Amino acid sequence: MASYSTRLFAVVLLFIVALSACGGEQATSTPVGTSFDAPTATRSGFGETNSQATSAVLSEPTVEATAVVLSEPTVEATAVVLGDESGSTTSDGALQPVVIEGLETFTHPQGLFSIDVPQNWSLADNSNPEEAILVWSDPSQNGALIVDIFEEESSYSGEELVDILRTFLTDSFSEEPDFSIEEPVAQDDGSQLIVWGYTALASNAIEAPLLGNSFIEQRGNKVSILTALLPEDQFDALERDTEAILNSYTINADATLGDGTASDDTTAPVAEDLPETIIGVGEAYQIGAVEVVVNGSEEREGSEFFQPEEGNRFYLVDVSVTNISAEQTVVSSLL
């Protein structure tokens, strides 16, 4: 299996989830995840080809993990002390709870997959021409959902898929404190589940055992890994919602991965009455808790692949974005 272990994934996805402590400063030190070279998947019960879905069930840790079961690790894990719903802290500190507010269906622009995701979670699209890599994180930055899909014309056996996933997890996290990885569990739909975890360090020296459930499967020429990553002590509270998310995941084996971008269409409709704000070079403009300064702009001719439509021009704009608040802020840009 050496050939599979060296393949992994062409581009490294650096997934950093900053753990946030209740009643304290924003966490800045230890990431919830490290380098993700390969896709990660948490879902059992994918369709044969396109979009059939069966049910995944979360359960307490057990050595006898059964098919279509998302389970906690059987190895001993360090406990995390959580605060109550009011966000108060204990003497040992506490993590902010992961919050899941209402689910809405996300469909990949190229039709690769669809999944129900929390409305209040933010999306980071790290896709490239060879791989679709999408990461959702909750407002506290303590929980994450990761979908990674790449194309492979070779048909892998269940054992080979397990080797790909196990090697990825070991290479990525074996240096983390208390790293553990369980034996794979074959699911009824043909996917393979691996439960894994390690202890991250949040701000105020709070130790945070993290639990990952990763499912790997192949549908046609699509290899998918779907992963849910949560603080272990919040597992029970999030069980029902997480099951709903995982069971909504469907893969379209007939879709084309393409260039990995969010859409083939580079234009976006703009309402004619949309208010217009002109910012001069060197000027600062405040949008909520964010201050934007335009440092300069440069006209570009485009390339053989991308040309401006008639009457339009390409400009490269250099801007500085500063969070002027005391709270963590998520910024998304769309040009």
Image (cartoon, helix red, strand yellow):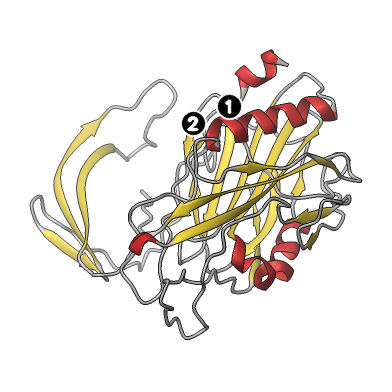
Crowding around mark 1 (Cα neighbors within 10 Å: few <14, some 14 to 19, many 20+) is some
Q: Residue 229 in the image: state x and y as whole percent.
A: 60, 54
Answer yes or no: is residue 259 visible.
no
* Crowding near the residue tagged with mark 2, few <14, some 14–19, many ≥20 C-alpha atoms within 10 Å: some
Tag 1: residue type? Answer: Phe
Image location (x, y in percent) of residue 207? 46, 59
62 lies left or right of 204:
right
Q: Amino acid at mark 2?
A: Val
Residue at the spot 26% in from the left edge and 69% down from the top edge: 289
Q: Residue 335: x, y in percent?
A: 36, 48
Q: Residue at x 55, y 46 (%)?
A: 178
Residue 173, given in percent of the width and then of the height, sits at 54, 38
Residue behind mark 2? 12
Q: Is residue 93 above or below residue 41?
A: below
Question: At numbered mark 2, what does the secondary structure look like: helix, strand or loop?
Answer: loop
Q: Nearer the viewer, residue 71 or 177?
A: 177
Above or below 68: residue 204: below
Q: Are marks 1 and 2 in contact (CB under 8 Å)?
A: yes
Residue toward you, 40 or 168: 168
Task: Tell me which residue sits at (43%, 78%) in the image.
Answer: 90
Query: Which quarter shows the N terminus?
Result: top right
Residue at mark 1 to residue at mark 2: CA–CA distance: 7 Å
- Of 54 and 335, the residue lying toward us: 54
Q: Which residue is mark 1?
A: 9
Q: Judging from the image, what secondary structure is the residue with disc 1 in?
A: loop
In this rendering, is residue 218 above or below 196?
Answer: above
